[in-house]
Image (cartoon, grey):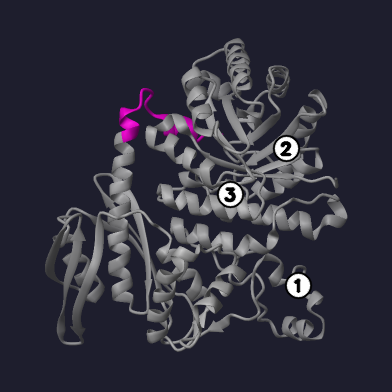
Amino acid sequence: MEDYVRIFDTTLRDGEQSPGATMTASEKLRIARKLDRMNVDVIEAGFPAASPGELKSVQQVCEVVQQAQVAALCRTREGDIRKSWEAVKDAVNPRIHVFIATSDIHMEHKLCMTREQVLEQIRFGVSLCRELCDNVEFSAEDATRSDLGFLTEAFVLAAECGATTLNVPDTVGYTMPAEYFTITKTIVQAVPDNVIISAHCHNDLGLAVANSLSAIAAGARQVEGCINGIGERAGNAAIEEVVMALRTRHDLTGIRTRVDNTQLLNASRLVSEITGLDVQRNKAIVGRNAFAHEAGIHQHGMLKQRETYEIMHPEDVGFSDTSLVLGKHSGKHALKSRFSELGYDVDEADMPALFDRFKALCDRKKEIYDEDLHAIIEAAGDNAEPWYRLEQVEFSSGTNVESRAVATVRCGDRTAVADATGDGPVNAAIEAIKKATAAEGTELVDYRLAAITGGSDAQGRVHLRIEREGIVARGNDTHTDVVIASAGAFVDALNNFIFQQERARQRAGAPEPNLRDAGTGV
């Protein structure tokens, strides 16, 4: 088979550590299904030792993933390792991903271990992982700030103990391409040929993708990253950029991936919608401006020959030249067909509800665009029963009229109605919801509104974040009325707050505290 690079997607683990990007179990499953359909090689589903809820979430990912390997992260501790195996043992193709730090600064100040003790932990942890699972990945946290001689010794030991993949994490985004090439090349030459070397780069200096490509040039055959480049701090290597760089410059690298690049845009939009982290307009590959040409000389060249200014075709990553597809006279089969073209595998049982949403939108809009269809899918995507449900919001406002709103919210098995005034209709609606849900202590810390398509009848997409009891939770919703969208987003954030609150309780009850901090390092 042609030489290829395996794509290890950690959107569900490292990506979720982006501030405010916590995902519910059902949201993780939606992303996992998309990653599996687009043929990523490995999906890192989570850190099972963090809490019973996290372990269960990884197990659920294993149930829905049909072809990709599913990895669970753990430290070199027996409890962590056994929980990771419990989480992934029923996967079609399980992997245990075990790690420990190897840099002097981490060993001294975090682990409080000597080099000899770290090597013994590697021996114990990797050996136990291999007893349980044939597919074991070992990561040396903060590899790029480690002594290269000791790092090599650690990786050679891990390979001897049965690790099948060795990951070289640039944990703090510190390295440069030439330096990372040297580190990777040294490891490649030191370990057996049948061991895969992996690159895991953070983007603190904006070099995550460049460093990943440098590692590939040095012999790495796995790259780890996230959709849209999300992740801790400045994020991880953007999977879509790595995939398209290898595809577009195959003439230089001779290397491809197995990823279906035509699904990259849909994956990007799905992750953005779920996490509430917008994709910048000029983002490479999947940004709204990635294939836009405004300069006159560029447009002239494009009209003559598109390759003059276009090194990739928009359809290569999932952009469609035809975005106006459906209207109020369209039938259910046409709608399902278009969902399929957009990359959504919709169950027949879900179609009636989606079709009702589509028809309701048609009553409010003359023209339905692909972006509208994405919004319909995202709005219907979470099948979990929320604690709060917005049933109705009525509001009044004007130039010389005080803004007032009345909100009806279903709270569990009861319905609450409250009214409030505000600086505007959005503020009034949110204040009314606060009263109805007894959430007066909730602070709105971020609010963003964007039109999904053009025109005065466009749907407005609202992303917002709230803070309560020290927990930041995000919410989003879409509607042709921005006040209703804002109210729906606020209720969604309240539900996410409850989810995070429960998750925090689970973490507090875990036998080993502060696991999130430990798990972010790789």
Q: Which residues are magenta?
A: 506-522
**Does residue 135 sit above or below 270 in this rendering?**
above
The mark that comes first in sequence, 2 or 3, is 2
Q: Position of residue 213 (x, y in %)?
A: 74, 47
Residue, disc 1: 310
| Residue type for callout 1 | Glu
Residue at 81 percent of width and 85 percent of height: 304
Amino acid type, residue under disc 2 in the picture: Tyr
In the image, 363 versus 298, the foreground residue is 363
Q: Please indicate whether residue 402 sits to the left or right of residue 65 in the image.
A: left
Q: Which residue is mark 3?
A: 226
- Decide whether residue 521 is among the magenta residues: yes
Q: Earlier in the sequence, mark 3 or mark 1?
A: 3
> Judging from the image, what secondary structure is the residue with disc 1 in?
loop
Question: In the rendered structure, does residue 129 fall within the stretch colored magenta?
Answer: no
Evaluate whether residue 284 shows in this view. Answer: no
Mark pair 2, 1: CA separation: 30 Å
Q: Where does label 2 land, which residue? A: 180
